Amino acid sequence: MDESEDVPKDFIKLKSEKLSVDEVSELVISPYCGAVSLFIGTTRNNFEGKKVIHLEYEAYTSMAETEIKKICRDVRQKWPSVKHIAVHHRLGVVPITEASVIIAVSSPHRTESLEAVMYCINTLKASVPIWKKTSQELGEGLS
């Protein structure tokens, strides 16, 4: 394979269906890269000492996709060796233990992909218009 056939790509998806770690990680695999780093954010069963039943996510989709594209551009400026980036975020109800976000980054070496994944999730949480609603058991702080 000629390296020109493996041009850097960004894969951004917001969807209501269950996310697949295999699907996201396969998107970023490249024969030119020795590292694929993943972040998987899952729904936990508690928040601030209260029992959680599930999370629910809403997004301003077009703006969220635009902001995620900006994050990908920033990653490529900060870590020029990064090859592919995938950011998949689930919308709607996300049950306990299921993934709400999966981020994958490939690069020739691990340092760049690990740092880029951390930058992606931290920046996504701070700047992308995706809102999380926590559903808790009645009697545990909600009325």
Image (cartoon, grey):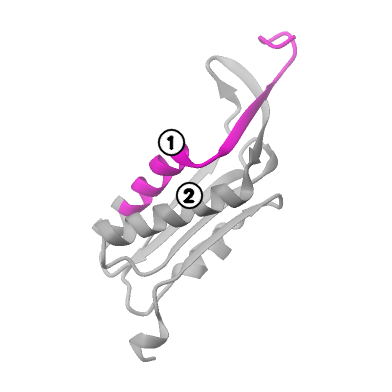
Image quarter where the N terminus lies is bottom left
Judge from the rendering whether residue 80 lies leftward or rightward of residue 95; answer left or right.
Answer: left
Is 67 located above or below residue 20 in the figure?
above
Q: Which three-letter amino acid code belongs to the residue tagged 1?
A: Ala
Residue 126 disc label: 1
Instruction: Give the crowd class for mark 2: few <14, some 14-19, many >=20 residues within 10 Å.
Output: some
Q: Position of residue 140 (x, y in %)?
A: 67, 10
Image quarter where the C terminus lies is top right
Kindly indicate the quadrant of the structure image that contains residue 134: top right
Q: Position of residue 72 (x, y in %)?
A: 40, 58
Is 141 located above or below residue 107 in the figure?
above
Q: Position of residue 60 (x, y in %)?
A: 62, 43
Residue at left offset 37%, top offset 59%: 73
Give the labeled residue for mark 2: 67
Q: Position of residue 123 (x, y in %)?
A: 40, 42
Residue at left offset 33%, top offset 56%: 75
Name the one closer to the observer, 92 or 23: 92
Residue at left offset 61%, top offset 27%: 45
The magenta stretch is: 116-143
Residue at left offset 31%, top offset 70%: 34
Question: Magenta includes 141?
Answer: yes
Q: Which three-letter amino acid code belongs to the residue tagged 2?
A: Glu
SS assignment at label 1? helix
